[in-house]
Amino acid sequence: MPLPLPPVFGHLLAVWWGAIWGSFANVCVHRIPRGGSIAWPGSHCPACGEPIAWHDNIPVLSYALLGGRCRTCQTRISARYPLIEALVAAISWLLWQRHPGSWAYLAEFTFALALVVMSAIDLELKIIPDRLTLPGIPVFFVAGFALDLAPWKERLAGAGAGYVVVWLLARAYEKLRGRAGLGLGDGKLLAVVAAFLGARALPVVLTLGSLQGLLVTVPLLLRARRRGRVRSVARTEIPFGPFLALGALEVLVLGQDRLVGWTLWLLAQVR
Ligand SMILES: [Zn+2]
């Protein structure tokens, strides 16, 4: 369904739409793990409780104009707010290139938005709330019918397999180390991902997530070792959810066949 407008309006619309929902994502990240309603009350400063006027609530721009502080109480506002707004705007624009002005765009955008919210909560609190993942599994299974990423049977099987794989890994880890280390929240996140992308995406998402997780974790560990603080970092659990979400977005945008192709090509060069 092409829009009857010059393409530039489509690009602007996609960015604006993404920024608005990025702003909503910030509300979700703050309120969902704290059990609050995401619809009411309107935006207010977490420090002084003062409601935020619409003109102080423009994605990215307001943060820059106010110098990252609340207009009323001057408390610093987390940089997470403009970062998430800009990130979701960028993702929206990227997905718009794939299917401009279509249900497929809306389905993919909603999927990406949910992944961003889950990742930000996981980064902040090291949990992925069931309030997001459990409804996410059926919602994104249904949303998957808006595009043709994988047959529905494969997506249904994937939703189950994603959870089971992480459950097995978590049990094995517990047996080996004598303590829990892998959250089942990651399993539910994988179930959401596979309900939308299909079971075949799971090994690719897990591999990409692990590799990129290592790319971030290893330098952190090495730096901590140089400073003699290895123990504290080894104990800090770096959440895996954001890396799985990143892998899922890469599979969505780049396609798993292309990603597998690149990996095989890279392996061939190494040999
Ligand atoms: Zn304030």
Image (cartoon, rainbow, N blue to C red):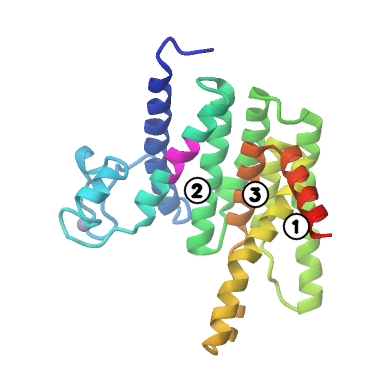
Residue 226 lies in the magenta stretch: no
Q: Could you give the CA–CA distance between mark 1 and mark 2, rounded to whole angstroms?
A: 21 Å
What is the spatial separation of the Cα atoms under label 3 and label 1, in whole angstroms? 16 Å
Q: Which percent across, then down, holds residue 149?
A: 71, 30
Q: Which residue is mark 3?
A: 247
Instruction: Give the residue displayed 74% in from the left and 46% down from the top.
Output: 262
The quadrant in which the N terminus is found is top right
For residue 15, side relative to residue 183 (left or right): left
Point out the image quarter for the C terminus.
bottom right
Label 2 belongs to which residue? Answer: 117
Does the rendering let one see residue 37?
A: no
Which circle's residue, 3 or 2, is located before the other in the chain?
2
Residue at mark 3 to residue at mark 2: CA–CA distance: 15 Å
Marks 3 and 2 close (CB-CB < 8 Å):
no
Q: Quick check: 160 above or below 177?
A: above
Q: Is residue 139 left or right of residue 6?
A: right
Q: Position of residue 134 (x, y in %)?
A: 63, 45
Up-down relation of residue 7 to residue 50 (above or below): above
Residue stretch rendered in magenta on the structure: 87-92
Which residue is tagged 1? Answer: 166
Q: Residue 259: image x %, image y %?
A: 72, 44
For residue 185, what is the image quadrant? bottom right
Report the amino acid beneath label 1. Answer: Val
Q: Is residue 239 visible?
A: yes
Q: Residue at x 39, y 44 (%)?
A: 85
Q: Quadrant of residue 195?
A: top right
